[in-house]
Amino acid sequence: MVDGIDICSPEECVSCFKIPFDSPVCCNENGCVHFSVPGIIEHIAQSVAAFVGESTLRLEGKIYPGYIGEIRDFELSNIPLAGQTLQTKIVVTAIIDDVTAISASCSADDGTPVAVLKMKISLDKA
């Protein structure tokens, strides 16, 4: 649920995802196809996974399995429609051992805020 990474630095990235009309995480209500809240969270989680994976590949030459350790402070502002493109900014707030803490903000291509959250990802380097 990530079509690409538009901007990527060691501290942040911006991902994009065009919401398909036939996505299993879309809801059809009164002829209007909306992305679901679990779909929004999954898109953000996959954006974080792509960012952390790319970062560890660049720094260590390896990609490790990762696990969501925490999602908190989730705030939903708007439910996007199928056909819209989401842009999600991921910012690293801390790295402690194999745990990366991030903050994420997601908006639709028209600039409408969609959601924000904080997440911790733990890498299994064993």
Image: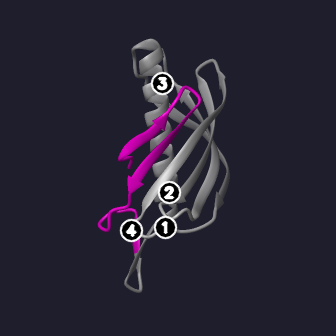
Nearer the N terminus, badge 1 or badge 3?
Answer: 3
Nearest to the observer: residue 79 or residue 13: 13
Task: State left or right for residue 39 relative to residue 76.
Answer: left
Task: Using the image, determine if residue 119 lies above or below residue 56.
Answer: below
Q: Quadrant of residue 53?
A: top left
Q: Which of marks 2 and 4 is in front?
A: 4
Which residue is identified by label 1? 80
Task: State left or right for residue 30 relative to residue 104.
Answer: left
User: Gap in Å between the C-alphas at discs 1 and 3?
Assistant: 29 Å
Nearer the N terminus, badge 2 or badge 4?
Answer: 2
Residue 55: x, y in percent? Answer: 48, 24
Alpha-carbon neighbours of circle 2 within 10 Å: few (<14), some, or many (≥20)?
Answer: many
Looking at this rendering, what residue extends furthest in the right direction? 73
Nearest to the observer: residue 21 or residue 71: 21
Magenta highlight range: 1-27
Label drawn at residue 40: 2
Nearer the N terminus, badge 2 or badge 3?
Answer: 2
Which residue is identified by label 4? 82
Residue at 46% over, 45% down: 15
Residue 21 lies in the magenta stretch? yes
Which residue is identified by label 3? 55
* Amino acid type at image mark 1: Pro
Task: Using the image, determine if residue 104 lies above or below residue 97.
Answer: below
Secondary structure at numbered mark 3: helix
* Amino acid type at image mark 2: Ile
User: Gap in Å between the C-alphas at discs 2 and 4?
Assistant: 12 Å
Alpha-carbon neighbours of circle 4 within 10 Å: few (<14), some, or many (≥20)?
Answer: many
